[in-house]
Image (cartoon, rainbow, N blue to C red):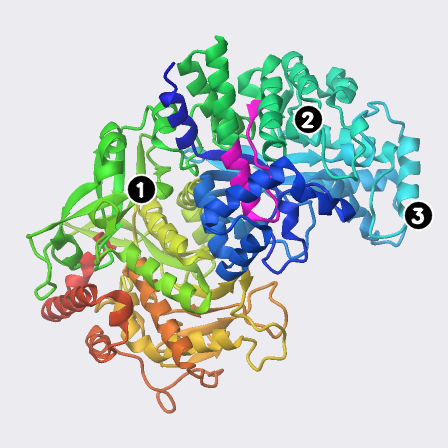
Amino acid sequence: MDFSELRKAVEEVELVDAHAHNLVALDSTFPFIHAFTEASGDALTFSPHSLSFKRSLRDIAELYGSESSLQSVEEYRRANGMQSICSTCFKAARISTILIDDGLKLDKMHHIQWHRSFTPVVGRILRIERVAEKILDEDLPDGSSWTLDSFNKAFVSKLKSYPLYFVYTGLLSFTVTVSGEIFGLKSIAAYRSGLEINTNVAKKDAEEGIKQVLTAGKPVRIANKNLIDYIFLQSLEVAQAYDLPVQIHTGFGDKDLDMRLSNPLHLRAVLEDKRYSKSRIVLLHASYPFSREASYLASVYSQVYLDFGLAIPKLSVHGMISSLKELLELAPINKVMFSTDGYAFPETFYLGAKKSREVVFSVLRDACIDGDLSTPEAVEATKDIFARNAIHFYKLSSDDSDINSHSNLPQKLNNCLEADVSLVRIIWVDGSGQHRCRAVPRKRFDDVVTKSGVGLAFAIMGMSSFVDGPANGSGLNAVGETRLMPDLSTRRRIPWNKQEEMVLGDMHTKPGEAWEYCPREALRRVSKILKDEFNLETYAGFENEFYLLKSITREGKEEWIPFDSSPYCSSSAFDAAQPVLHEVTAALHSLGISVEQLHAEAGNGQFELAFGYTICTKASDNLVYTREVVRAIARKHGLLATFVPKYALDDFGSGSHVHLSLWQNGQNVFMASDGSSKHGISTVGKEFMAGVLHHLPSVLAFIAPLPNSYDRLQPNTWSGAYLCWGNENREAPLRAASPPGTPYGVVSNFEIKSFDGSANPHLGLAAIIAAGIDGLRRHLSLPEPVDTNPDSENLLRLPKSLSESLEALHKDVFLKEFIGEKLLVAIKAIRMAEIDHYSQHKDAYKQLIHRY
C-alpha cells in the first residue's frame, strides 16, 4: 500500500496543542533533566537509563546539532539563549495554537502572553483547585472566617468574573465563546483525593473540609476529599452554564499521585448524573495505563473526550503506539485529541509534536493495513486528531464550519476546511510605506505560489507616495524581477471578507534567497546582529492613531471631513464610532493581535489603538495587518480611515508611537534590576537608547518619511520636536515609560513618538535597532533627562523638514552596514523625490489620505 499521502498529511498539518504549561527562564532553578521524566529526588539518578530518556535526548541533540549528552545539550541551551532555542523548537514543532494551564507553579515561569512570540494563538486553561486555594489564602474583608457559603459565593463569582471574549460573527453580532482568555477549566482532583467524586457530597462535610484546610495553615493546599468533590461539582456546573470544557487529569503523573485513584472509571457517578450530562469532559494523558478504560468511556458517554499528551512522548515507542491504539479501539476518532503537555522547556513541546506525528502515522498506517480505515479516511483522521477536534471542542473558531483565522494551518488542511476561500492576497509594504498586494486564486496559491512566489518588477521598491513609478536615482527600474514569496506563518483568513485570505510576502531573488531590498529581511538581518553580538532581542508595541473621515459634496466636489468632533477620550466619540471600533477590535483579535486600549484622540474624528508588546518582527507584521483591518472595516461603514501624519494642518497629527524594550533569555533587561539605578534603566538599556537618540535625526528619514510628517513634528503637540529624552515626558521624542505594574523606580521600556503611520514598519524598526546597536558597540552615554517642557534655548531642534532629515542621513554612514548600500540608495532617492514633488505642489498632501 502507498502511504505517501498519509505521511504528507501527518508531516504538513500544523498542530493545535490543547494542553500545556508555561515555559521557564533559562536560569530557573527547575532542572532541565525534568524535561525527560516525571521522577524526582533520588529516582532522578535512574532516569537517564530509561528508553524514553535516551531517545528524547538523542532527538534534541539532533535538532541542535550537539553531542547526544545531557551536558552538551545544556551547554547549547546556555550558549544560544531562551529566545533562540524557543524559536528552533517551535519552528520544528509547527504548533499553531497552545492552551496553557498556568496553575503549575514553577520557578521563573513566563507569563502566558510571553508565549505569543512563538505561536499565533495562546489561550488559558484555568485550574480550579488553584483558584480555590488563592481565594482561601485571602482574608475576608470583615475579618470573619470562611464558611462554605462565603467560599462558594467567592469561588463561583471568581469563575464567572473573567471578561467575556467575543468572536465576531457579523456586523455588530457577537457570540460569547469563552471567558476572557479562558478556553476551559481543569481539575487535578486525581492528585488530591482521587477521581471517585461523590456527586452528593453533603454541605456539612464540605464545610468541615474548609475548616480542616484552613487549620493546616497558609499557603492553602486543598486535599480534603469532601471539599475537592464540592469544588469539582461547582466548577462543572459553571462550565456547563458557560459551555466551557473541563480537562481532568487521569492516569500517570509524578509521585504525588496515587495512581489507584486516577483510573477514569471512578468518574462513572459524575458521568451518570443527569445534572452534568451536557458537560464536556476531556480525559488527559491517554489515562495511561488505563487507556482501554478511557476508550470505553468515550465510546458510551457523549460528554467524554480524550487527549493523549504526556503519554507521548514519555513512554517507550512501543508504549506510545500501544496506548494510542488502545484509545482508538472503541473511542470515536473525532473525540481523540493531540497535546504535548509541554512544560518549562521548549524541548518538551518539540518532543511531544515530533513523536506524536510519528506515532499517529504508525497507528493510522496499521489501521489501513488491518482494514479498519481506508487511506483517505486515515488522512481525515490525521486532521481531526491534530487540529480539527480541538478547534471544535475548545471553540477556537466562531462556528464549526471553519478553522479559526488565528490558525496558520497548511494548505492541505485549508483545502479541506476552507474550500470557500477563493482568493489569497499577498501583501508587501514598499519603500514609501504604502501597502500593496497581489491576489491569487487559492488553488494556484497552494499549488504554485507557495513554492515559486509571484513575479514583481524591481521598480516596486522604488516607488514614491505620489506616483507608481520608481524614483530617479533609486537604482530600480523596469528591468529585473523579484519573487514575492508568501510567508505562510502569517497566512490568515480575512476577517471582513471570509472568502479571502491574506499573507505577508518576502522578496527573494529566487525561492530561498532574500532580495537585498526586502524590508522584512532587513529587520531580520538587523535583529540577528543584535542577537549574535549582544544576545539581545527587541520587543515592540505600537500605538496607532488614525482619523475616521466621511465624504461630503461641496460645490460639486467630494471632500473628506472628520465624521465626529468630540474631544479627547470622549465617551460620545466612542459611542459614535462604536460600530467600527467593535468590529475592528474583534477582527484584530481573530488575527491574534491583542488590543490593550482604544480611545478617542484629540483630533476631530481621531482615535488610537494600543497593542501589547511582542518580538519586533511580529510587532511589525501585526502593524501591517492592523492598518489593513482599520481601513477595510471603515470602508465597510462608508468611512475613510487614514494614518497620514497630518491630515489637516490645523488639527492634531497622527503618530504610530512605538514602545521598545530589550530582552535576554526571556527577561526584560532594558529595565534596571532594582530601583537603585539612577534612571531605572539598565546599562545596556541606556547605551541602546543613547544610540537611538544620537542617530534620531537620520533615523527620522525612515520613521517620518514624508514632508507631511514634519508638519506633525512640532513643539507642544506631544510628538517630540527637540533632541532629548525624558521620564514620562510626552513632549520628548524618546520617553522612558513605567506603565502600571512596573516596580517603583524602574523603567520597563521607552517610547519613540516620532514614528508615524506612513513609515514602513520593518524598515523603521530596522533603522531604530541599528542605531541602538551602534550605541551598544560604542558604549554611548545617555544624557540627563529633560523633565520640563523642551524648548530651543537649551536643546537642539530635530530636523524640521524631510530635507534636513535626509541631509542627516547622508552624513550618518553607519546605516550602510545594517540596511545595505543598495536599499539605502533607494530610500534616499525616494525621499528626495518626495521633497521635490511636495515642494512644487503645496496641496498635494491632501491626496495622501487615499494612500496611507
Q: Quadrant of residue 533?
A: bottom left
Dot 1 corresponds to which residue?
Answer: 503
Q: Amino acid at mark 1?
A: Val
Query: Closer to the camera, 796 or 790?
Result: 796
Which SS class for mark 2? Answer: helix
Is residue 346 rendered magenta in the image? yes
Direction bottom: furthest residue: 793
Near mark 2 (Cα within 10 A), the count class, few <14, some 14-19 or many ≥20, is: many
Q: Residue at x 50, y 63 (%)?
A: 663
Q: Quadrant of residue 30?
A: bottom right
The circle on residue 215 is: 3
Read off the magenta span: 336-355
Dot 2 corresponds to which residue?
Answer: 287
- Residues at discs 2 and 3 in contact (Cβ within 8 Å): no
In x, y percent, where is residue 638?
29, 42
Which SS class for mark 3? Answer: helix
Direction top: furthest residue: 371
Quadrant, the N terminus = top left
